[in-house]
Image (cartoon, grey):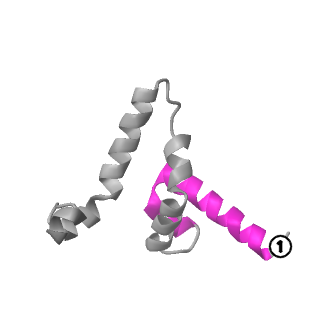
Amino acid sequence: MSIRTEEMRFRQILCEYALKHGVTKAARRYHTNRQFVYRQLKNTDEKIIYGREVFTSEKQLKKEIKEHEIKYNSTAKYVLNFKSPNEIIK
C-alpha cells in the first residue's frame, strides 16, 4: 500500500471515530491535535451532511442544507456586520 493511500485511510478512520466518539477522544487516540481533526471534518463535510441521515423528502433536505449553511457561513456575515457585500459597497 502506498503512503498516500495509508494517509487517506488514516484520515477517513479518524473522521469516522471523531463523529462517533467526539473530537477530543479522536485526537487523543490517534495522537494528533484537535485542530487537525476539525480540519479533516470540515474537508469531508460535504460527504458527512448526506451520510448522517436518509432524507425522505426534498423539503427535509432543503431544511438540513439551510441549517448547515447558517452554521458554517456566519463568519462572513459577522465581519460585514450582517450586511451583504452589495450593501457594503453602497
User: Please, is residue 35 above or below residue 24 in the view?
Assistant: below
Q: Is residue 81 left or right of residue 32?
A: left
Which quarter shows the C terminus?
A: bottom left
- Dot 1 lies on which element? loop
The x and y percentages for residue 22 are 45, 55
Disc 1 packing (10 Å; few <14; some 14–19; many ≥20): few
Q: Residue at x 24, y 65 (%)?
A: 85
Return the residue found at the far top: 56
Quarter of the picture containing the N terminus is: bottom right
Q: Say whether residue 38 is left or right of residue 31.
A: left
Viewer-proximal residue among 16 and 60: 60
Q: Is residue 11 above or below residue 32?
A: above
Quarter-of-image position of residue 11 = bottom right
Residue occupying image coordinates x 50% and y 60% = 41
Question: Range of the magenta residues?
Answer: 3-29
Front residue (pair 85, 61): 85
Image-quadrant location for residue 3: bottom right
Does 13 lie within the magenta span?
Answer: yes
Instruction: Kindly identify which residue carries mark 1.
Output: 2
Residue at point 83% right, 73% down? 2
Q: Residue at x 32, y 58 (%)?
A: 73
